[in-house]
Amino acid sequence: MIILGLILLAIGLIAGISLLTTIGVVLVAIGAVLWLLGAFGHAVGGRPHFW
């Protein structure tokens, strides 16, 4: 998600399309939050495993 956000952010900045830039920033922010939660050991949207 972070990589897709960076790609859209770059395309939006180069092409001057503010919608792509906004979507890119949002995807980078959401991806960073999910990555940090996963790094701290919180299951985000996953199923619990009982083994």
Image (cartoon, rainbow, N blue to C red):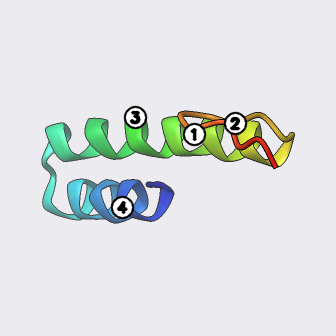
Give the quadrant of residue 22.
top left
Q: Are marks 1 and 3 in contact (CB under 8 Å)?
A: no
Mark-to-mark CA distance, 3 and 4: 11 Å
Q: Residue at x 45, y 65 (%)?
A: 3
Question: What residue is pinned by disc 2?
Answer: 43
Mark-to-mark CA distance, 1 and 4: 21 Å
* In the image, residue 12 above or below residue 50: below
Mark-to-mark CA distance, 1 and 2: 6 Å
Q: Are marks 2 and 3 in contact (CB under 8 Å)?
A: no
Mark-to-mark CA distance, 1 and 3: 22 Å
Determine which of the numbered discs, if any, sits on residue 46 in the image: 1
Mark-to-mark CA distance, 2 and 4: 22 Å
Q: Earlier in the sequence, mark 3 or mark 4?
A: 4
Mark nearer the viewer, 1 or 4: 1
Question: What residue is pinned by disc 4?
Answer: 4
Q: Earlier in the sequence, mark 1 or mark 4?
A: 4
* In the image, residue 11 above or below residue 51: below
Give the quadrant of residue 14.
bottom left
| Rendering coords of residue 2 (x, y %) | 49, 56
Q: Amino acid at mark 2?
A: Ala
Q: Are marks 1 and 2 in contact (CB under 8 Å)?
A: yes
Numbered circles on residues, count:
4
Image side of residue 3 versus residue 44, left or right: left
Q: Residue at x 57, y 39 (%)?
A: 46
Mark 2 is surrounded, within 10 Å at the Cα level, by few (under 14), some (14 to 19) or many (20 or more) other residues, namely: few
